[in-house]
Amino acid sequence: MYLPRSEDKKEEIEGPERVDIPRGHERILVVEDDTLVRASVVRQLLSLGYAVTEANDGEAGLAILLNAPTPMDLVLTDIVMPGKLGGKGLAGEISRRWPGTKIVFMSGYTEKAIFHQGQIDAGVDLLSKPFRKADLARIVRETLD
């Protein structure tokens, strides 16, 4: 098939706007029961310069915190997890034992459902899944700062 050559000038197509993604060096514990989600979050945080430790549920996360030589700077935890200690219970333990440790919740449920069901209190940092790396970087940096 032969098509005639166009004499029109090509329109330049702009790509997505480049966003500066904030980075850091602090110590973060990621508590997430879904293996693939946890691996993705850990990989993203490592690429942003953070020192990351991971746990697959609230009980394992608490054990890591209890055995750490110094408190974590931030805990990024899913809200709804199997086991005796969910995200809200873990956050309560963290606030009681390590008041300087910041907490960010993440959830696949909508913000409205989470707050309406009393899973977490208003005013806490919540990252809704799925999220972009830029969103993760922003909320982590804002919470740490």
Image (tube, grey):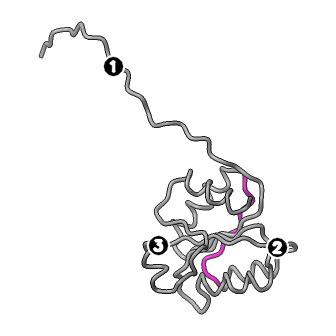
Q: Nearer the viewer, residue 115 or 18?
A: 115
Q: Say what amino acid the circle numbered 2 marks.
A: Pro
State which tag comes first along the sequence, 2 or 1. 1
Q: Does residue 83 belong to the magenta stretch?
A: no
Vertical placement of 59 versus 111: above or below? below
Q: Secondary structure at mark 1?
A: loop
Q: Which residues are magenta?
A: 49-58
As drawn, is 48 to the left or to the right of 73? left
As drawn, is 111 to the left or to the right of 4? right
| Residue 76: quarter of image | bottom right
Which label number is shown at residue 101? none
Question: Residue at label 2?
Answer: 71
State which tag comes first along the sequence, 1 or 3. 1
Q: CA distance from mark 1 to mark 3?
A: 41 Å
Question: Which residue is found at the position 66% from the left and 84% from the top?
Answer: 90
The x and y percentages for residue 111 are 46, 72
Q: Which image quadrant: the C terminus?
A: bottom right
Question: Residue at label 1?
Answer: 11
